[in-house]
Amino acid sequence: MPGDVERFLYHEARLLDTQRYEEWLALFTEDATYWVPLEHDQAEPFETSSIIHDDRTLLELRVKQARHPRAHARLPLARTVHQVGNVMLLGEGAGEVRVASTLVLVEFRAERQRVWGALVEHRLRRAGAGFRIAHKRVDLANSEGELDGIAILF
Amino acid sequence: MGAFDRERLAMLVQPDRVHRAVYADPAIFELEMERIFGRAWLVLGHESQVRAAGDYFTTRMGRAPVIVVRHDDGSVRVLVNRCAHRGATVCTEGRGSTERFVCPYHGWSYDRAGALRAAPFESGYDKGRLGELRLHAAPRVALYRGFIFASLAATGPSLEEHLGPAHASFDDFVDRAPGGELEVAGGVFKHAYSGNWKLMLENHLDGAHPAWVHASSVAVARGAPEPGAPGEEHYYDIAVRQMRQNGAPDAVWEAVGIWTTPFGHGWLGDYHNDDRLVAGLGNPAFAEYYRALAAKAGEAEAKRILGVTLWNTIVYPNCSFMSQFRQMRIVHPLAVDRSVVYTYSFRMKQAPARLFRDTVAFANVVNGTASWVLTDDLEVYERVQRGLASGATEWVYIGRGHGRDVEEPNGSRRGGTGTSEVYIRAQMRAWLDYMTAGA
């Protein structure tokens, strides 16, 4: 079982790093949420802003924007390397597993390289032999810092 | 002072063009820090950030780190965050409440007015000298309807004179809150870009840019599912509506009103009324808000308040805000080609709680560091800065609508059409006034 979860997370990272965003989007359930909080230990996304807080519709708009011929901040798309580690099962029940992991991400675009670090939590829903993502939370180490524009997916 | 005397500075700013040095020359930037950010009234924040005696937050005035603190006598003080001894900052970045600011280096401690109250190993220092030392305080601090302004110059125009007719935008901001109560809430976005500080201020009233800069977000929003009818709202509605709105036809942007003042302020109007307002459309929270406003202000006054159709306002040289969405952006220059913008959301304290959720959602879409909209603005600022770094071409053209500006009786000047670059010309005129005052 842990092996299945790890393989799934690696697969997700691989889709992002090879810019197969539509396939990545298809990993999410219809009721999925994707959340990159603004504040450390942020409790909820409605009373405090978020770097990203998307339902499935908004997440799809992000993927579509990445393909638009006049998406200036995304032309060219950044190259990324997602290094997923420290995978731990947090809990299980009701057909879902909660998984913690760490993310170290290298981003390169326009002669600039950035490194991101994040604590990640997935809520994975069992779907046939595999999983779909019902919720993904990415807590960036520098979420409260002064950040240049972000045009990548974590 | 040599290189940039009055005559030379005046040559850089011409009626319909500006020399690239204004954006790219580090020597000009140094002069701006002294003559603009060292003199002008700057917007620092809002009194809700320093409610009780001892409450403080840190920010910047130009490159100077400052502490905004509520003094025991109820006044707001602005202290330069720099120990009078060896120069360390005495307060870590952020906010809090304190009796004393204590330097981590040798324990010098200062009260809420910046007076030195203790210096360990006191006998080692000359008494007279110690008596002279304190945290430097901004000599002028003033509030306008709860917004905190400060100037590092002891003399200059009053805040009232500085704001001129631009006070109406602050009035609109406050009047929209039932009972006039606003508070900073919902987190602070801090977005940085490798470009000059002026580029942000020159973008926010530019009705000709959304169709190009924001083409991709307009296109994806047009392809999105329709926002929900009343009672069937979705989380994504505000995002989709706001992004679509940037794709308004050219004729709409041309018909928008645009005004400027001699101090470089500017604002857009005649665009958003509450039928078009993304937060207002079919929104039961908005209807509830209207009832709360009418209960406080009366029906007629509520209608008048919501009939004010101001949109983005620039308060030169460091602030841009949207009264209708309760967003305020403050730009901090870091270097000639590096800036950071702090974005604040405001809650109307007596409005229905769920209306603030719209503010948060709106902030995420428009001002979020990873938003569909802002990221393309930042990309363009950086591309302008790259283009201006080279002397291969000297001039920046700011001539859209030039020759069609209209003088208004209250000292403001209006663009002939909504997409006029009159606001950049006004900012440049103010820039030159600041830069040559006393030169």
Image: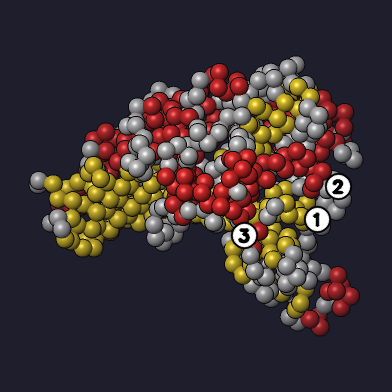
Give the answer, above or below, for where A65 lies relative to A134: above
Asked if B398 appears above or below A63 in the picture, the reply is: above
Where is mark 3, residue-wise? B48
Rendered residue at 70%/30% (across/down): B259
User: Mark 1, chain letter?
Assistant: B
Q: Secondary structure at mark 3?
A: helix
**How far apart in space, not on screen, are marks 3 and 2 (Cα)?**
27 Å
To which chain does the residue with label 2 belong?
B
Badge 2 density bin: few <14, some 14–19, many ≥20, Cα 10 Å: few
Residue B322 appearing in the image: no
Where residue B251 appears, as percent x and y from the top left, is 55, 18
| Image depth: mark 3 or mark 2 in front | 3
Residue B258 horizontal/vertical position (percent): 67, 28
Of callouts 3 and 2, the N-terminal one: 3
Q: Residue B291: image x %, image y %?
A: 51, 49
Amino acid, disc 1: Arg
Q: Residue at left 64%, top 72%?
A: B98
The residue sitting at 56% across, 52% down in the picture is: B295
Q: Residue type at mark 2?
A: Gly
State the residue position of label 2. B156
Residue that carries the numbered disc 1 in the rendered image:
B140
Quarter of the image holding residue A29? Answer: top left
Position in image of residue B60 (x %, y %): 67, 53
Residue B8 occupies quadrant: top right
